[in-house]
Image (tube, rainbow, N blue to C red):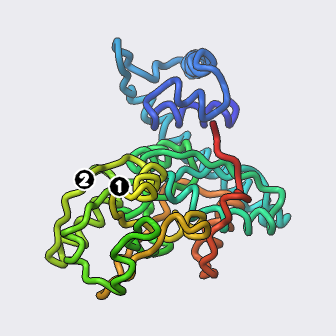
Amino acid sequence: MQVESFRVFRDLVETRSFSRSASLNGITQSAVSQQLRSIEVRLRVPLLERTSKQFALTREGQLLYEASREIIGYYQRFQHQLEEMRNIISGTIRLVAVPSLGLHELPPYIKDFLKAFPQVKIQVDYRRSNEVYESVAEGEADVGFVAFPSPRKGLKVETFKKDTLHIICAAGHPLLKKGPIHLPDLAQSKIVSLAPEMPTRQGLDRILAARGLKFHPMMEFDNVETLKQAVEINAGIAFLPASAISSELAKGSLAILSHQGPEIVRPLGIVSRASRMVSPAVKRFLKALKTPRESSPASPAEPAFSIPS
């Protein structure tokens, strides 16, 4: 049996999906089925108990799964140690992020990393927060990025950075003339916000509630870009990080409304799989993320990577 067969079987068990196992290994779904049948014929034992919609491991299948994890783990450690001995930093890093982080927070890190390690290729996918955790857990991505991170079983979740949620308004808004305001003063203003199910909205609501405040948004949106546009046409005031509105601040269509009191801080998290070995490239990238750097959001005119269609 080849190492690839152990990897395909491990991924099949962990994703519980023939199609996902095929996608992770760059083969067709029928090829996964063929490899599974080939292993069963070679070992002369059934590995799965199949039903119409799902499958369960036989005792022999569970034994092979555990062996597969160990074999792939040893093989990956060997590959990574060999690359480190040869000082080779190459390969592909698969990232998955919520759009606000992927578009506005990650570009400067990616740009600096690719400049230092030009042989590395970085792929970025954009997902909702819950899908970021799932993608990393299922092995579809090496590293994930979320706002207001929360612990998840089988995943390593760390805070790598904290940014400030500013009060954003359209240029020329009357409150800009009043100087620093108190947050309760916003009760008389129209508020627009992210949707209630989004972690940034949930985190913001918790912070405001701890300060005895509760706002009732006039409109709610499922992404930062649409929320910014609503603020630009003066539909209301919103809470957003400065990195997400750098171009709008530069051209003067949006402004930051200063307020008295403590800042509203949003933690940003790195999600990785606790049980998986990481390549030297991923290891270096994680180290770069945790290294303090100047806050300088990438210019939208010069993105560090292309946005997938």
Residue 30, given in percent of the width and then of the height, sits at: 60, 15
Q: Taking 14 as reference, is 204 above or below it?
A: below
* Name of the residue lying farthest toward the top: 52
Which amino acid type is marked by label 2? Answer: Met
Residue nearest the viewer, comparing 287 with 254? 254
Which residue is identified by label 1?
235
Left of 84 or right of it: where is 168?
left
Which residue is identified by label 2?
218
Based on the displayed image, in which of its 4 quarters is residue 215 positioned? bottom left
Res 158 visible: no
Is the residue under label 1 in contact with that under label 2 (CB below 8 Å)? yes
Left of 47 or right of it: where is 82?
right
> Which one is earlier in the sequence, the residue at label 2 or at label 1?
2
Q: Taking 60 as reference, is 189 above or below it?
A: below
Find numbered disc 1 in the image and state the secondary structure of the residue it sits on.
loop
Res 12 visible: yes
